[in-house]
Structure formats: structure tokens, C-alpha cells
């Protein structure tokens, strides 16, 4: 290939620039790898030190408890008793501080994540990536909610094929299964999701799996329309939940980031209560629908022609779902109400 003198000198200059850039990339990457090693060492030493301190604090708490119990015989002075109380308070504060620190340190996966993913580190190491992951989880739920809404509408009003129903139930199994994995990762990263909500998704996976295996027949057709209408309603409620949960997420994030506090804690609380009072009637209606499903299936189970085991299994599952969802939601609202009472109005 022939180069004209100007063309070749331009190429040469370009190549020299690329060489310099390549040198820079190599140096930066070397530095990056070195820093990664340093970070890993820091993580190990920090985790180790926290574990040692936790163990010692536990032992110290037991010793202090014994000192207090033997108080009449050891004759502690009032100053000593005050010092013990002070130490116990500091120990509680320190344990909380360790929990906060551990949210940014790698930890061992629980049994479920180890079984599903193996022993891979799923701890996100900064607030921004934790927020982004949670945001993505909410968006994932929203997209699937829309798909499930359209799917259940199609099955309910447009096409009535057992194969299409099976596909719909398979999608539900996959969706709930994915949620349980994502939620375990969120918990690993410091999310305060209550155990029941995760268990609810395990149970929903099971329920959808049972629905998938329910053979076509008179009983299946008897429950089909009620089930699909319930799924439609659930998608609608999930959409409202998305609006509320993502609103909470963005406002809490803004609270954490804005130092001038133009979005106040009080402002957040009032937004949260407005959102919650709007959402609650829809949630409770959904819970009672679950109870209604359970009773309908129980009545079907008592029919002489009922041979399918799926009927009883679904009835029990809906009953557990109703009780768990209803009482946990009541508990959450009560807890929020009590916290609201305890908090000073202005921060
Ligand atoms: N699924 C997944 N995560 C949930 C959740 C749910 N149902 N409810 C709460 N969480 C998460 C929150 O996002 C928050 O996460 P974070 O620590 O990462 O920020 C954490 O759990 C603590 O939330 P909390 O303050 O206890 O509740 P909330 O104000 O976010 O939501 C409710 C309260 C009652 C609105 C919510 O729990 C809910 O929608 N429950 C009803 C679910 C239901 O019954 N579904 C069936 C409908 S038919």
C-alpha cells in the first residue's frame, strides 16, 4: 500500500498518540489492580477486626450483666453502677455502628443465594450502586407488572386456551423466583425488607407452580375466571405499590443527600402517610380477595367430583397468603404510626 507523504506523517502522529494513550491505559490499569488488592486487604482486616470486637463486646456484656446481678455481694458503688450503664449504652451504639460499616463490606451469602448463585460476592460497595440496584428492582417489577396485566387480560377476555394459561403461570413462576433472588441480594446490601414479603414471593412461586400443573377440567374452568380477574387486580395494585415505593426511595435518597434539607423529614413523613392511606384500601381489598379465593377453592374441594390435589393446595396457600399479608401490613402501619408519634416534629 502506498502512502502520500502528508497522509503517512498524519498516520505516524496518530500512531504516536495511540502509543502514549496505550501507555497511560497500562499504567492506570496497573494502579487499579494494585488498589483493588489494597481494598481486598482492607476489607479483610476490617471484617476481621469487627468480628473480634463483636466477640469481645458480647463477652463483656455477659460479664457486666453478672456484675450487676452480684451487685449486693460485690457491693458496687453508685459510680460503678453508672459506669456499667454507660458502658452498656456505648456497646449498643457500637454494635449499631458495626452493622452500618458491614453494609459496605463483603459478607458470606445466605443458604438460598449460595444454592442459586454459588459463593459469589453480591455486596455493592457504595451507596450509589445500592440505590441503582434497588431502583432497577422496582423498575423490573413495574415492567413485569405491565406484561402480566396484558397477559392476564388476554387470557381472561380474549383467548381461552389451557396452553396459554400454562404460559402465563410459567411466567408467574419465573417472575416470583427472580424476585426472591433479587430480594436476597437487596437484604445482603442492607435493605430492611421484612422476611414475610420475601416468604410471600416463595409462596407465590409455589402457588403459580401448582396452578401450572392443574389439569384442564370442569373444576379448573370453575376457578379460572376468578383467578385471572384476581391476577388483573393484583397487577393494578402492584402498579400503585410501584408509585409509592419508588416515591419513598427517591425522597429518602434526597433526604440523605441534601444538606440544606429543603426536603424535610416532616415533608417525607407527610408524603408517606398520604401515599399509604391511598394505597391501604386497595391492599386490604386484595388481601380479602385472597381470602375469597381460599374459601372458593375450599368449597370446590368439598364437591364430590373434586379429584385434583391442586384445589386443596391452592386453597391453603391463599389462606396463608391472606393471613401473612393482612397481619404484616397491619403490623407495618402500626409500627410506622408508633415511630411517627415518637419522632420530634422538626429536624
Ligand atoms: N415487597 C418488597 N419490598 C418491600 C415490600 C414488599 N411488599 N414492602 C416493603 N418493602 C421494602 C421497602 O422498599 C423498604 O426497602 P429498603 O429498606 O431497601 O428501603 C423496606 O422493605 C422497608 O419498608 P417499610 O418502611 O417497612 O414499608 P414501606 O413503607 O416501603 O411499604 C407497604 C409498606 C404496606 C405499602 C408495603 O409493605 C406493601 O405494599 N405491602 C403489601 C404487599 C401486599 O400485600 N401485596 C399483595 C397485594 S394483593
Image: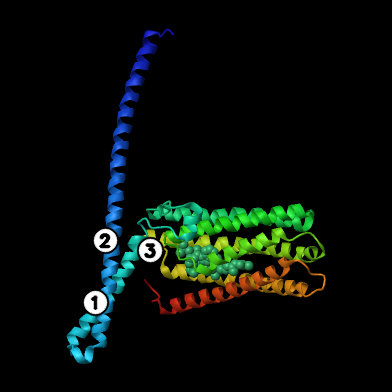
Q: Secondary structure at mark 2?
A: helix
Residue drawn at x 75%, y 56% is 155
Say if mark 2 contacts mark 1, CB within 8 Å.
Answer: no
- Give the vertical position of 223 relative to 3 (above or below): below
Q: Which residue is mark 1?
A: 87
Q: Secondary structure at mark 3?
A: loop
Q: Secondary structure at mark 1?
A: helix
- Is residue 204 visible from the viewing direction of this image? yes
- In depth, the one of 55 and 95 nearer the eye is 55
Which label was assigned to residue 11?
Answer: none
Which label was assigned to residue 49?
Answer: 2
Say if mark 3 contacts mark 2, CB within 8 Å.
Answer: no
- Give the vertical position of 190 relative to 118 (above or below): below
Residue 242 position, x and y percent, is 56, 60
Residue 138 position, x and y percent, is 53, 57
- In depth, the one of 16 and 310 nearer the eye is 310
- In depth, the one of 186 and 265 nearer the eye is 186
Residue drawn at x 58%, y 73% is 324
Q: Which residue is mark 3?
A: 261
Q: Going by the image, does 311 lie left or right of 244?
A: right
What is the CA distance from the residue labelled 2 to the residue labelled 1?
Answer: 20 Å
Q: Which marked residue is nearer to the observer: mark 1 or mark 3?
A: 1
Residue drawn at x 43%, y 58% is 109
- In depth, the one of 17 and 191 nearer the eye is 191
Amino acid at each position: 500500500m502506498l502512502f502520500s507523504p502528508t497522509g503517512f506523517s498524519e498516520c505516524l502522529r496518530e500512531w504516536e498518540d495511540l502509543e502514549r494513550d496505550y501507555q497511560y491505559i497500562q499504567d492506570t490499569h496497573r494502579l487499579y489492580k494494585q488498589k483493588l488488592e489494597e481494598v481486598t486487604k482492607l476489607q479483610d482486616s476490617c471484617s476481621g477486626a469487627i468480628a473480634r470486637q463483636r466477640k469481645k463486646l458480647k463477652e463483656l456484656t455477659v460479664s457486666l450483666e453478672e456484675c450487676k446481678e452480684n451487685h449486693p455481694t460485690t457491693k458496687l458503688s453508685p459510680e460503678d453502677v453508672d459506669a456499667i450503664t454507660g458502658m452498656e449504652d456505648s456497646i449498643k451504639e457500637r454494635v449499631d455502628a458495626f452493622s452500618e460499616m458491614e453494609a459496605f463490606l463483603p459478607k458470606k451469602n445466605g443458604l438460598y443465594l449460595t444454592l442459586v448463585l454459588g459463593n459469589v460476592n453480591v455486596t455493592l460497595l457504595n451507596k450509589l450502586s445500592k440505590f441503582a440496584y434497588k431502583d432497577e428492582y422496582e423498575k423490573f417489577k413495574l415492567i413485569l407488572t405491565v406484561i402480566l396485566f396484558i397477559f392476564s387480560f388476554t387470557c381472561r377476555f380474549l383467548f381461552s386456551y389451557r396452553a396459554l394459561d400454562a404460559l402465563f403461570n410459567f411466567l408467574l413462576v419465573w417472575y416470583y423466583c427472580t424476585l426472591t433472588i433479587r430480594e436476597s441480594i437487596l437484604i445482603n446490601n442492607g435493605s430492611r425488607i421484612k422476611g414475610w414479603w420475601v416468604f410471600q414471593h416463595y409462596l407465590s412461586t409455589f402457588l403459580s407452580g401448582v396452578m401450572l400443573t392443574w389439569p384442564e377440567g370442569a373444576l379448573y374452568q370453575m376457578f379460572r375466571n376468578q383467578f385471572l380477574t384476581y391476577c388483573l387486580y393484583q397487577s393494578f395494585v402492584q402498579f400503585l405499590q410501584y408509585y409509592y415505593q419508588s416515591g419513598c426511595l427517591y425522597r429518602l435518597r434526597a433526604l440523605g443527600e441534601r444538606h440544606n434539607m429543603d426536603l424535610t423529614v416532616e415533608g417525607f413523613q407527610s408524603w408517606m402517610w398520604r401515599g399509604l392511606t391511598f394505597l391501604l384500601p386497595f391492599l386490604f381489598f386484595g388481601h380479602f380477595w385472597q381470602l375469597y379465593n381460599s374459601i372458593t377453592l375450599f368449597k370446590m374441594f368439598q364437591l364430590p367430583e373434586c379429584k385434583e390435589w391442586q384445589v386443596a393446595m391452592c386453597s391453603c396457600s391463599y389462606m396463608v397468603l391472606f393471613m401473612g399479608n393482612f397481619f404484616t401490613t397491619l403490623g407495618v402501619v402500626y409500627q410506622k404510626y408508633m415511630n411517627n408519634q415518637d419522632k420530634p416534629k422538626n429536624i
